[in-house]
Amino acid sequence: MTEKFDIVPLNEWGMFSLPPRPCVIAGPCSAESEDQIMQTAAGLKEFGINVFRAGIWKPRTHPGCFEGIGVPGLKWLQRVKKEYGMKVATEVASEKHVFECIKHGVDLVWLGARTSANPFLVQEIADALADTDIPVLVKNPVNPDLDLWIGALERLHRAGIRKLGVIHRGFSTSEKIKYRNDPLWQYVIELRSRFPQIPVFCDPSHLAGSRAYLQELSQRAMDLGLEGLMVESHCDPACALSDSKQQLTPADLKDLLENKLIVRDADTSDSAYRETINQLRAKIDVVDDNLIHLLAQRMEISRKIGQSKRENNIAILQTSRWDQVLAEMIEKGREHGLDEDFIKVVFNAIHEASVKAQE
């Protein structure tokens, strides 16, 4: 059973002012040198970025890769605070990381995707952060597991963390997609539906894996009404020691935020809009009622199919039959302008429920 979260509103964290949106956290994937940090921070501060991020410890898949500069980089963040008046943020993955961040005056920390998937590490970090006032953001776990994401939030909340939020960075997938990680926006929508008080940031850099997709993913986050963006920015991305393809120069980030991003309003008091939207929502309510009725009919037919299979000693799962049905539904969906991935998600969920109904 999930807990009720008592969260300090984002505009009371002392870092962001709401409105306007988006709240932006920006800086390089990794702190590489003092000059790189100061040059990037200067470029970001110039157009109003107030929260500077840099990876100090970098979890890497293979040993021998650049795993972060470590504690010396925290002194560079201290210099950013002192000279530019910016808040500074970094990722933590252990109790030791937390203690070093506290000692060096880091203003915000986040848990990475690998860390949030490990309840032991989350609890260790939560215990280390107890009785502090440091804001904490939790990236979604590597794999699409909403309960694991919520569980990490619960552990931090129980430790007394009230300045608490999440970062959507997408999920690992074995399928061939154009992004580095699969957005699976439905998990963000579900999290927001359950816990509307928790601020949500989007990390379009790790979602995209390429500068080419940063604008469309950032726009999608704004269209969904998310509060902020965490974007990787480097003074010279081509020379970055990690994730060079997904980082923007400060100038390019300024262009994205000021010229290419449309921020949607949460609502409006315009009477014509209200009347139109209410009429359309009423139509959707009717369609949804019909969908429920049709799904109930389908499940009843599935139960009858299951009974017939049992009586004739036939296996429930008929893979070739389902492959044929799904292919036909994808084609019919395409004829009606429906996205193939959407059709797959919907009909695979229906199929799974139908198999259970036949048991």
Image (spheres, rainbow, N blue to C red):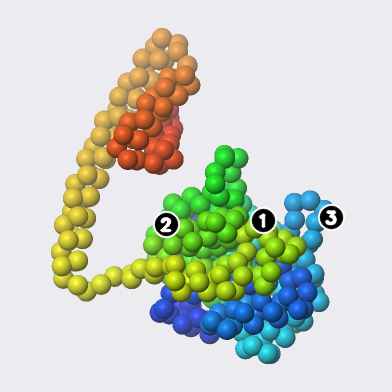
- The C terminus: image quadrant: top left
Q: Is residue 316 above or below residue 31?
A: above
- Residue 90 in sight in this render: no
- Camera-near label (1 vs 3) is 3
Q: Is residue 317 left or right of residue 98?
A: left
Mark toward the start of the polypeptide (1 vs 3): 3
Q: Which residue is mark 3?
A: 64
In this view, which residue lies farthest toward the right? 64
Does residue 188 appear left or right of residue 245 in this picture? left
Residue in view at x 59 percent, y 50 percent: 180
Q: Which residue is mark 1?
A: 114
Q: Quadrant of residue 309?
A: top left
Q: Nearer the viewer, residue 134 or 255?
A: 255
Q: Is residue 11 visible?
A: yes
Neighbourhood count class around disc 3 (C-alpha, 10 Å): few under 14, some 14–19, many 20 upward = few
Q: Residue at x 37, y 26 (%)?
A: 328
The quarter holding residue 70 reads bottom right
Closer to the camera in the image, 127 or 203: 203
| Mark identifier at residue 189 | 2
* Disc 2 packing (10 Å; few <14; some 14–19; many ≥20): some
